[in-house]
Amino acid sequence: MPKNTNPELLLLPETNGCRNCGSEQRAAFCAECGQKHFTKRFTIKTALADFFSAIFSIERGFFFTTIQTLVRPGVVVKDYVGGKTAGYFPPFRFAFIWITIYSITLVWSGLLEMQMDQFSMDNSFAATQGQNEMSEKVRVFVQTYFNFIGLLSLPFISLASKWVVDKNDGNLAEHFIANTYAIGIQSAVMFIVAPIFLLIPSQLYLFSSFGLLAGVIFLGLTYKDWLNYSIWSSIGRSIAANVMGTVMFILGSMVIGIIIGIVWMIAIN
């Protein structure tokens, strides 16, 4: 069949109002709700153009935010919480994408399984059969939900982050934004260095330590430029926030696990 190139078929029905809220619209964007004024229907071409624009845009894109967060994380957070958001990829989406990319890389490359095997070997001499079965269940759980673990820890680390800084230095939501960007760029760095540890598996035990160090450094640099602390004060507060947040996350997970176990036992009885 010949391709239909009638330009009228590519146009949306004419309207004098915003297609989202119905208010009168004279500009490219609605003054009431911010909706962009569209005159043409979506096509595969425009959908792909929007996708690549969001990812590769120099002024506002995923890679631009990655580079900026890599070289000056505190400035990114300071801009974003100060209302200058147009130039940056939203923090939660930024972190989710990088955590997902990093998680897929770990699982598909076998790096995560190699780490868990190494941990199991280090502890196998004292493990009972029941402990080995539990270890296998933990392995399956981590491999299945690895990309969510970092996101679930965010509220705890953000709360700890708020506690370790001065009273008026950012509210809880702003610290959540700061830590979301930090964990996103931490995942990006770990994704970049993962192939190195695949090439030198004898140094695999350093991989997790490198990740922890990266997290501390990026949150510390965030404090430095966002809250104007000295570098050593920033790193010290970052260490305290990460340790406190991780402990709270582990304790919170244990409490939730115990509650779920009790409810499950009651349900089956």
Image: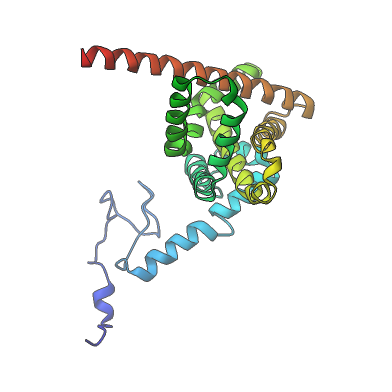
Quadrant in which residue 26 is drawn: bottom left
Q: Residue furthest bottom?
A: 2
Q: Is residue 71 left or right of residue 23?
A: right
Across and down, in percent, residue 209 comes to 68, 33
Residue 151, position as x, y percentages in the image:
48, 33
Residue 219 image point, x, y percent: 65, 32
Residue 43, above or below 174:
below
Choose between 185 and 50: the one closer to the eye.
185
Name the image quarter holding residue 168.
top right
Q: Relative to 11, say whether 193 is above or below.
A: above
Q: Quadrant of the N terminus?
A: bottom left
Residue at point 64%, 35% (across, down): 208
Residue at the image position 53 percent from the left and 29 percent from the top = 176
Query: 115 or 18, which is in the foreground?
Result: 115
The picture places residue 195, in percent across and down from the top left corner, at 64, 51
Locate the C terminus and report the quarter of the image it occupies.
Answer: top left
Q: Is residue 46 left or right of residue 95?
A: left
Number of disc labels:
0
Task: Name the image colouring.
Answer: rainbow
Q: Quadrant of residue 238?
A: top right
Q: Residue at x 56, y 30 (%)?
A: 120
Residue 171 can be seen in this image: no
Tell me, yes or no, if residue 10 can be seen here.
yes
> Which one is in front, 218 or 211?
211
